[in-house]
Image (cartoon, helix red, strand yellow):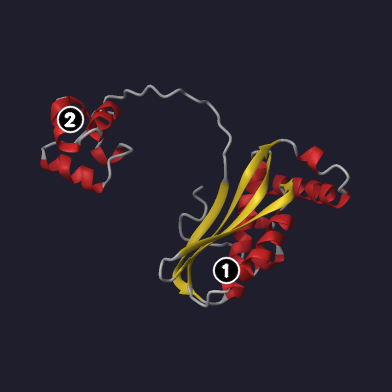
């Protein structure tokens, strides 16, 4: 890591990088070589962590694989939108992506949250807890349709939209769907759909409402970053 630029190191933002460069420190190795007293005097307690990170020192336990505590998808519009028909189409697409990722982890959720940031940057979330956990697109989207009127109550343009799936549990959907033949049927359908997506890409099969966005959906980050 020593020859790498400072900006390559997590925890070193533009302002910290600027301060260090003004001190003549331009690489991770040069940061590691600074006296600890200098780092503490310049950055306070955080200077200790920065220098340890630059030296490759970390006492955190190594976890080879961990399950997510939430799965979310969101996107910021290039221009603030007031057309809720279009906003809903995009939201459905994000829900499809989130539910697909949920199944990839063999998980299901109990809580669905709609996130809305309006043009004035005021941000609100609207959540609903399901009676039973699910991994099905239709059930997630059904909840979102119940939450959308709450978001529309404020007559303002929308800057960002997102959906989050929380209260996750792992690999228990067989028990949850027992006695729900309709849900079990859809789970089997989506299992086949996901297998096709794995081979040919997610965009090949989508719900009708999101297909109207076009064959290839291009949304700004961080729509698929989490």
The answer, for residue 219, to whether it is visible in the render is no
- In the rendered structure, which disc, 2 or 1, sits on the residue that comes first in sequence? 2
Above or below 3: residue 75? below
Residue furthest left as drawn: 23
In the image: residue 58, left or right of residue 112? left
User: Please, what secondary structure does the residue beneath circle 1 have?
Assistant: helix
Residue position marked by numbered label 1 in the rendering: 151
Question: Which x, y percent locates residue 206?
Answer: 68, 59
**Based on the displayed image, in which of its 4 quarters is residue 171 positioned?**
top right
Res 225 label: none
Is label 2 in contact with label 1 (beta carbons under 8 Å)?
no
Residue position marked by numbered label 2 in the rendering: 30
Above or below 207: residue 5? above
Question: Which x, y percent locates residue 10?
Answer: 33, 38
**Based on the displayed image, in which of its 4 quarters is residue 29 positioned?**
top left
> Can you say which quadrant of the picture contains the N terminus?
top left
In the image: residue 84, left or right of residue 36? right
Above or below 5: residue 82? below
Question: Which x, y percent locates residue 110?
Answer: 68, 47
Q: How far apart are marks 2 and 1 (CA)?
A: 50 Å
Q: Which residue is drawn at 57% across and 68% down?
A: 151
**Based on the displayed image, in which of its 4 quarters is residue 22 positioned?**
top left
Observer-side mark, 2 or 1, equals: 1
């Amino acid at each position: 890591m020593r020859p790498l630029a400072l900006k390559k190191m997590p925890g070193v933002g533009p302002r910290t990088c600027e301060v260090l460069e003004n001190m003549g420190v331009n690489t991770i190795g040069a940061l590691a070589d600074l006296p600890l007293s200098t780092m503490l005097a310049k950055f306070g307690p955080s200077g200790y962590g920065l220098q340890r990170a630059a030296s490759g020192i970390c006492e955190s336990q190594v976890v080879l694989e961990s399950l997510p505590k939430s799965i979310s998808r969101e996107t910021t519009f290039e221009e603030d939108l007031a057309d809720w028909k279009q906003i809903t189409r995009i939201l459905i697409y994000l829900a499809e992506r989130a539910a697909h990722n949920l199944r990839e982890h063999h998980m299901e959720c109990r809580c669905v949250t709609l996130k809305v940031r309006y043009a004035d940057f005021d941000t609100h979330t609207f959540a609903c807890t399901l009676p039973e956990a699910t991994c099905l697109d239709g059930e997630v989207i059904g909840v979102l349709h119940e939450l959308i009127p709450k978001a529309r109550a404020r007559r303002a343009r929308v800057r960002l939209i997102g959906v989050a799936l929380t209260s996750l549990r792992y690999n228990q959907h067989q028990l949850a769907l027992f006695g729900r033949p309709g849900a079990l049927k859809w789970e089997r359908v989506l299992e086949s759909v996901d297998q096709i997506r794995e081979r040919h890409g997610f965009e090949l099969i989508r719900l009708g409402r999101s297909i109207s966005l076009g064959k290839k959906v291009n949304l700004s980050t961080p729509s698929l970053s989490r």
